[in-house]
Image (tube, rainbow, N blue to C red):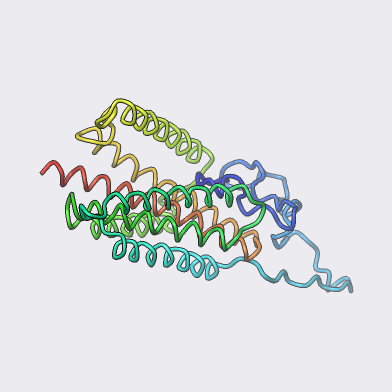
């Protein structure tokens, strides 16, 4: 199962020193096909079908060390999100969006967003996780979020930022509970639906941005008024679906014993998804408060 997240969709915890673990092998939703041995192609997995070599007098294979655990994922995700929070706070304090500094602050914020995008794309196409690149992405993304959050808080509504943070946390907790309770089942059909919806959403937003750039105003109106509210809700729902796919990716990586360094990729992917949800909440709240 490949995640909708760009970093997961390319790598999916599947590479190990240049080889493939078989984690992203094409299998039917819900598990391997009947009559097949999924452990035959997966060096990370423990094979319950193997004979007890100790009874045959053969030496026992050493247990695999350095495999990814949930603690690794939580720790790396905490570090990455902590970096976003620290740089966002610094940007908020040091790059004010008052009339005297708004041009400079916006310029730095947009520049930071571009650098974060480049770091994300480089990491997405690397064979191995690079903690330096991932933390650089988090740092520059935090600068952008700090500037845009400060602008919304100053010129739209002072309460937008804490509301967006609380909304993001609520979506994360809700999806995690639903996933753990198996109310959400990540199947091949679910994955296909989310990817198709995400592609359509991104294309529409790109077209809207082009019309806004060359025609002025709000483009086609997808980010303002009633349409803006509808697309804001759709964006949050898509973010929640991305989280479910990311949770599935992490769960499978741990199950199949992916290398510990892959936990940085999990942190990277989860951070990207949470940033998406936060920005959609911030935009939605801005529209709702702006209409009051």
Residue located 57% across and 63% down the image: 131
Left or right, 254 with reference to 56 = left
Labels in figure, total: 0
Q: Is residue 150 above or below residue 241?
A: below
Residue 194 vs 41, above or below: the answer is above
Q: Quadrant of residue 97?
A: bottom left
Looking at the image, which is closer to me, 221 or 132? Answer: 132
Image quadrant of residue 94?
bottom left
Residue 75: image x %, image y %? 50, 70
Residue 121: x and y, percent? 55, 47
Q: Is residue 64 left or right of residue 8?
A: right
Looking at the image, the residue that sits furthest to the front is 100
Report x, y in % for residue 276.
39, 49
The image shows residue 56 at horizontal and vertical percentages of 88, 70
Quadrant where the C terminus is found in the figure: top left
Q: Is residue 200 left or right of residue 92?
A: right
188 left or right, relative to 49? left
Please tell me which residue is depicted at 65% across the width and 56% down the height of the picture: 128
Q: Residue at x 30, y 62 (%)?
A: 92
Identity of the residue drawn at 43% across and 65% down:
83
List the single residue furthest toward the right. 57
């Amino acid at each position: 199962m490949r995640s909708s997240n760009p970093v997961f969709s390319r790598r999916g915890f599947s590479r190990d020193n240049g080889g493939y673990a078989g984690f992203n092998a094409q299998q039917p939703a819900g598990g391997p096909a009947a009559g097949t041995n999924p452990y035959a192609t997966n060096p990370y997995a423990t094979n319950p079908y193997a004979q007890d070599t100790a009874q045959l007098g053969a030496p026992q294979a050493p247990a695999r060390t350095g495999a990814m655990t949930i603690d690794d994922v939580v720790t790396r995700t905490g570090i990455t999100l902590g970096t976003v929070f620290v740089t966002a706070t610094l940007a908020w304090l040091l790059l004010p969006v008052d009339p005297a500094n708004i041009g400079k602050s916006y310029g730095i914020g947009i520049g930071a967003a571009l650098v974060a995008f480049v770091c994300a794309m480089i990491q997405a196409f690397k064979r191995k996780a690079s903690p330096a690149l991932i933390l650089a992405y988090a740092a520059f993304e935090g600068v952008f979020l700090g500037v845009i959050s400060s602008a919304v808080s100053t010129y739209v509504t002072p309460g937008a930022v804490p509301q967006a943070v609380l909304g993001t946390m609520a979506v994360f907790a809700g999806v995690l509970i639903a996933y753990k309770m198996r109310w959400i089942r990540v199947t091949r059909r679910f994955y296909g639906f989310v990817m198709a919806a995400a592609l359509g959403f991104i294309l529409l937003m790109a077209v809207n941005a082009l019309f806004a750039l060359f025609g002025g105003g709000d483009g086609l109106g997808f980010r303002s008024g009633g349409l803006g509210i509808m697309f804001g809700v759709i964006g949050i729902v898509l973010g929640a679906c991305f989280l479910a796919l990311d949770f599935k990716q992490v769960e499978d990586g741990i199950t199949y014993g992916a290398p510990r360094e892959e936990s940085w990729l999990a942190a990277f992917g989860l951070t990207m998804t949470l940033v998406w949800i936060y920005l959609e909440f911030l935009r939605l709240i801005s529209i709702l408060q702006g209409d009051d």
